[in-house]
Image (cartoon, rainbow, N blue to C red):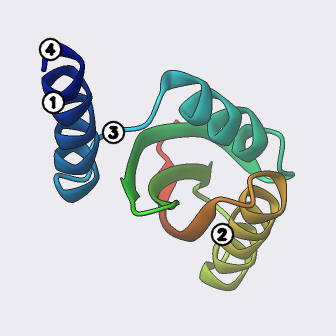
Amino acid sequence: SVVIVFNAVKLLLSAVNEVMDIAPSSEIEKLIRDTAINVEGVVELDKCKIRKTGLFYFVDLHVVVDGNISVKEGHYISHLVKDEIMKTEPKVFDVIIHIEPDIY
């Protein structure tokens, strides 16, 4: 009966973590940050929030770009970042990019 209870608790915790949108491991965040910072036009990264729902990850990322570029250029950079992240990590279902201007 101890084995059954142990396995039941293990399965229950796994299911609860899925329902509660548990944060993924730090390796996933590092991979996403490393991928995003290497995209041309990205000055730095600010907030990075990742949540796991089911088998996939949803990413909210604040990307800092040169404050003197046009909105069109900033929008283009955001698409480059999103495409690169989704190409690098196939488990990423969607990426929401928020563009921040570099204030320096």
Q: Nearer the viewer, mark 3 or mark 1?
A: 1
Seen from the viewer's position, the closer of residues 21 and 94 is 21
Q: Earlier in the sequence, mark 3 or mark 4?
A: 4
Looking at the image, is mark 2 or mark 1 earlier in the sequence?
1
Q: Residues within 10 Å of mark 3 (few under 14, many from 20)?
A: some
Q: Position of residue 60 (x, y in %)?
A: 42, 58
Image mark for residue 2: 4
Instruction: Locate residue 28: give its quadrant.
Output: top right
Q: Indicate the amino acid at tag 1.
A: Val
Q: Determine whether the residue tagged by mark 1 lies in a helix, strand or loop.
A: helix
Q: Which residue is mark 2?
A: 78
Dot 3 and dot 2 residues touching (CB under 8 Å): no
**Comparing labels 2 and 4, the label whose residue is closer to the camera:** 4
Judged from the image, the secondary structure of the residue bearing numbered disc 2 is helix
Discs 4/1, front: 4
Kindly report the distance in space between the C-alpha atoms of the residues bearing marks 3 and 1: 20 Å
Residue pictured at 77% horizontal, 42% vertical: 35
> Which SS class for mark 3?
loop
Q: Which circle, 2 or 1, is nearer the viewer? A: 1
In space, the residues marked 2 and 1 are separated at their CA atoms by: 42 Å
> Which residue corresponds to mark 3?
23
- Residue at 45% x, 38% y: name it: 46
Disc assigned to residue 61? none
Label 3 to label 4: alpha-carbon separation: 30 Å
Q: Residues within 10 Å of mark 2 (few under 14, many from 20)?
A: many
Q: Earlier in the sequence, mark 3 or mark 2?
A: 3
Callout 4, which amino acid? Val
Which of the 4 quarters of the picture holds residue 71?
bottom right
Of the two numbered discs 2 and 4 on the same chain, state the one appearing first in sequence.
Answer: 4
* Amino acid on which the number 2 mark rests in the picture: Ser
Q: Locate the N terminus and report the quarter of the image it occupies.
A: top left
Residue located 73% across and 56% down the image: 85
